[in-house]
Amino acid sequence: MNSSTACPLDCYDACEIEVKNDKLKGIKRAHTQGFLCPNLNHYEDYETIKYPSYKGEEISMQDALLKLEKMLSFTPKDEILHYKGHGNFALMQDVTSHFFASYGATLTDGSLCDGAGEAGIIEGRGSNKNMPISEIAKSDIVIFWGRNPHATSSHLLPLIKDKKIIVIDPVKTDIAKIADLHIQIKAHGDLFLAMLLSRFLYIENSYDEEFVKKYASEYEEYYELTQGVRIRLILEQIDLTLGDIGNILELVHGKKVAIVCGVGIQKYSDGADVMRSIDGFAAMLGLFGKEGCGVAYLGASRDLVNNPFETQAKKVSKVNTRFEDFKTVFIQGANPLSQMPDSLRVKESISKVENVVYFGLYENESSEAADLIIPAKSFLHKDDIRTSYSHNAMMNMHKQSDCEFGISEYDLSKYLCDTFDIELKEELYYINHFKEFSKEDTTGISYVKGRENIPYQDGFDTQTQEFCFLEDIDSKMPDDSKLSLITSKSSRSLNSQFKRDTKVYINSSLGFTDGEFIRISSQNGSVELEVQNNDDVRSDSILIYSGTKGLNNLTSSRHSIEGKSAIYQEDRVTISHV
Ligand SMILES: Nc1nc2c(c(=O)[nH]1)N[C@H]1C(S)=C(S)[C@@H](COP(=O)(O)OP(=O)(O)OC[C@H]3O[C@@H](n4cnc5c(=O)[nH]c(N)nc54)[C@H](O)[C@@H]3O)O[C@H]1N2
Ligand SMILES: Nc1nc2c(c(=O)[nH]1)N[C@H]1C(S)=C(S)[C@@H](COP(=O)(O)OP(=O)(O)OC[C@H]3O[C@@H](n4cnc5c(=O)[nH]c(N)nc54)[C@H](O)[C@@H]3O)O[C@H]1N2
Ligand code: SF4
Ligand SMILES: [Mo]
């Protein structure tokens, strides 16, 4: 057996792993640099589901598959929903979609993650081509804008050790604590900050004239739009000063700048515009198409890799799914009862479904709500292959050992395809298909063929090949009577997998005591959580990590204006003693 594989998780780094004496180790090359994160260092400590069960009774895998077959046969095809998350990010995971789509079931679209930001990027640039980690390593200055690398992209840290660092984040994160400049902006103030930065670049004549004339020639119209932002008023509203703007501009002047954005900036209804305003600032600085410069976000991990499982199917949004419209719901690699917005609605909606099937690794809110539980095999016990949304490698994920428990996505799909007379080729056929889209370099690492490390060297992918700046804005800062909800990722969990956080983090000036339980309420619902005072959080916001039980009682299932994305930080909250 080949001892190498890759971490399957939905994470920027997509590390390469070597299994030695049953221990998982990071491979000492390229992006992985020989170390893993707490989630993978403790991967095998987390108990997985071993046996299938039906209505709480343990059954054999054979019986579970028969039950599933029956549920599907007795459900009108348009009342079957396949709801898939990204608990495992590898490419073979989609094989089930091939079965469900071919069978006539409904699939999902929309995004719980990066959709709004991606929409903004595509509007500006015509495509979402990312700045990979290897280029960030070549920059002089890194701006972490709504990204928390110590938790979510720790493999970037060794690469930026000697660089100047700017952090734009309402929370004083670990990277903010060691940055040269931390702009502790009020949550949701980023669009205005980015527009003011662009405006001052213009006023001070320090934009990249050669670049904008060639590739962003509407920059004067954009400058006019930025003039609509009332400087004093907005600076007060986003709690910054002219000095902050000057400090940022001084640091980036004439330098190779990497703007490393995360999903934190775009969990709002206007998330697309926020991202586009940051891209606009990058365009004014002429950061595209040059070595060590650019904007990094969540790239399109499957770009230039053909999906052999793509089949036409009806789709409903995974943000506000009406589960009650379906008789059989098959949940795979997801914990929608915790991670979808508006959990109270989701719970009610799923409770009306006759057959809920959960196909996953761990017990959680969604397995609790399921009639039929089918354990999956973990990445250590199946073959797969993966790409990443922050670098261009394609990595084989060799099976490391056999395991008597669970079933792989391929084997489950094979069973269903055989049963319902749908064609499915051998597993190896598909893995080889994916491999065809990669090319090995001299060091033995495979990369996705045709993916550029420095995209946009000959202009953008818009019709005019020029960058399209924002043309109007409809954003305003919310009033101050309530608190902003900041909900970011914890370093000990991967959303609701592994060690889930349990607390609410608030500024001590709000006057609550460590250990006391408080009620947090929004227009969607409420949750009671234990207080942990933490002055890294602004006094006009609270922080609750993704994966915390009950957190999404607070969030709404409306979509972002563009990008069909969830907007976890749109609704504001109040807190009270219980
Ligand atoms: N350990 C760990 N790693 C993970 C995950 C995990 O759960 N745990 N999840 C994975 C997934 S699914 C994703 S999508 C990525 C996401 O990873 P990141 O892109 O890093 O996203 P978040 O942690 O949601 O938010 C990042 C930062 O945005 C800040 N922020 C919040 N609101 C605002 C705002 O209005 N303006 C600005 N400027 N900043 C703001 C937060 O304070 C936080 O520090 O991480 C992946 N990696
Ligand atoms: N409030 C709030 N809500 C959020 C977020 C936030 O920041 N704040 N983040 C959002 C984001 S960015 C995302 S991406 C979503 C993530 O939401 P989900 O995709 O629901 O992610 P997880 O909570 O990680 O649950 C993944 C599940 O996959 C299962 N799994 C793991 N490996 C395998 C496998 O190999 N096969 C199968 N069949 N199953 C497997 C595990 O049992 C686990 O329960 O959450 C979103 N929800
Ligand atoms: S979760 Fe991310 S950082 Fe951790 S091992 Fe996996 S890919 Fe690497
Ligand atoms: Mo995500």
Image (tube, rainbow, N blue to C red):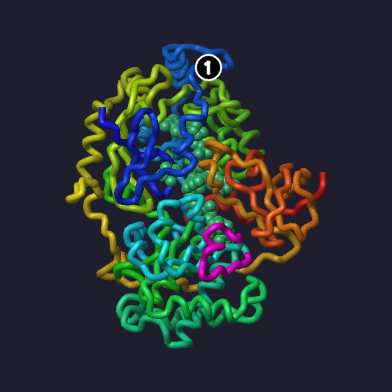
x and y percentages locating residue 151 in the rendered image? 51, 50
Q: Position of residue 350 (x, y in %)?
A: 59, 31
Residue 312 lies, with reference to residue 222, above or below; the image says: above
Work out whether residue 456 or residue 420 is closer to the camera in this orientation and state it.
Answer: 456
Look at the image and say whether residue 173 sits in the magenta stretch.
yes
User: Which span of residues is magenta-colored?
Assistant: 171-186
The residue shown at (60%, 67%) is 184
Can the viewer see residue 66 in this picture? Answer: yes
The answer to whether residue 123 shows anywhere in this view is: no
* 322 relative to 356, above or below: below
Q: Position of residue 385 (x, y in %)?
A: 30, 38
Residue at 33 percent across and 53 percent down: it is: 391
Q: Secondary structure at mark 1?
A: strand
Residue 446 lies left or right of residue 124; in this view the side is left
Which image quarter holds the C terminus? Answer: top right
Q: Quadrant of the N terminus?
A: top left
- Mark 1: give few (<14), some (14-19) or many (20+) Cα within 10 Å: many
Residue 257 inside the magenta-drawn segment? no
Q: Amino acid at mark 1?
A: Ser
**Residue extending farthest front:** 21
172 to the left or right of 199: right
Residue occupied by mark 1: 53
Specify whether tag 1 is near ligand 2 (CB below 8 Å): no
570 vs 384, left or right, is: right
